Amino acid sequence: MNFKPMGDWVLLEMVEPDKEAGGIVLSDNAQDRPCDGIVVELGTGVLDKQGNKIEFEVEIGQKVLVPRFGGEDINIEGKKYRQVKSEDIIGVYE
């Protein structure tokens, strides 16, 4: 991929939610909850007030939870991705 996010942006490949969870069909309201993504690229980073680089709290390949309606949806080489600020990531699956 020939794309590098700038600053504290994180590029995610979104994981489509299952319409069925454990055999139960989910309503559209249930699908409006936060969604999952896989980290595919980290930005160049930002500096704190003292000039020290702030490290990302996520790593490439990790599965994360992000708000459904946050970030920027982008298309790179015909594939859909979402770019979010690192501070908008709700959590990391372990």
Image (cartoon, rainbow, N blue to C red):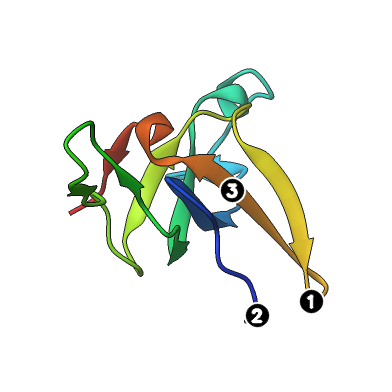
Q: Earlier in the sequence, mark 1 or mark 2?
A: 2
- Residue at 17% of width from left, 47% of height from top? 52
Q: Describe the element under mark 2 as helix, strand or loop.
A: loop
* Residue 44: x %, y % from top left: 42, 60
Residue 10's disc number: none
Observer able to see residue 17: no
| Tag 2 residue | 2
Distance (Cα) linking label 3 and label 2: 15 Å
| Tag 3 residue | 83
Asked if residue 25 lies left or right of residue 56, the reply is: right
The kind of residue tagged 1 is Glu
The kind of residue tagged 2 is Asn
Residue extending farthest to the top is: 29
- Residue at 28% of width from left, 37% of height from top? 91
Q: Does 1 sit above or below residue 39? A: below
Report if the CB atoms under discs 3 and 1 are less than 8 Å apart: no
Report if the CB atoms under discs 1 and 2 are less than 8 Å apart: yes
Quarter of image, res 38: bottom left
| Tag 1 residue | 77
Query: Within 10 angstroms of label 1, few (less than 14), some, or many (20 or more) residues?
Result: few
Quarter of the image with the C terminus is bottom left
Q: Earlier in the sequence, mark 3 or mark 1?
A: 1
The kind of residue tagged 3 is Gln
Q: Describe the element under mark 1 as helix, strand or loop.
A: loop
Distance (Cα) linking label 3 and label 1: 15 Å
Asked if residue 76 lies left or right of residue 57, the reply is: right
Distance (Cα) linking label 1 and label 2: 9 Å
Closest to the camera, between mark 1 and mark 2, is 2
- Residue at 61% of width from left, 35% of height from top? 71
Observer able to see residue 14: yes
- Residue at 47% of width from left, 52% of height from top? 10
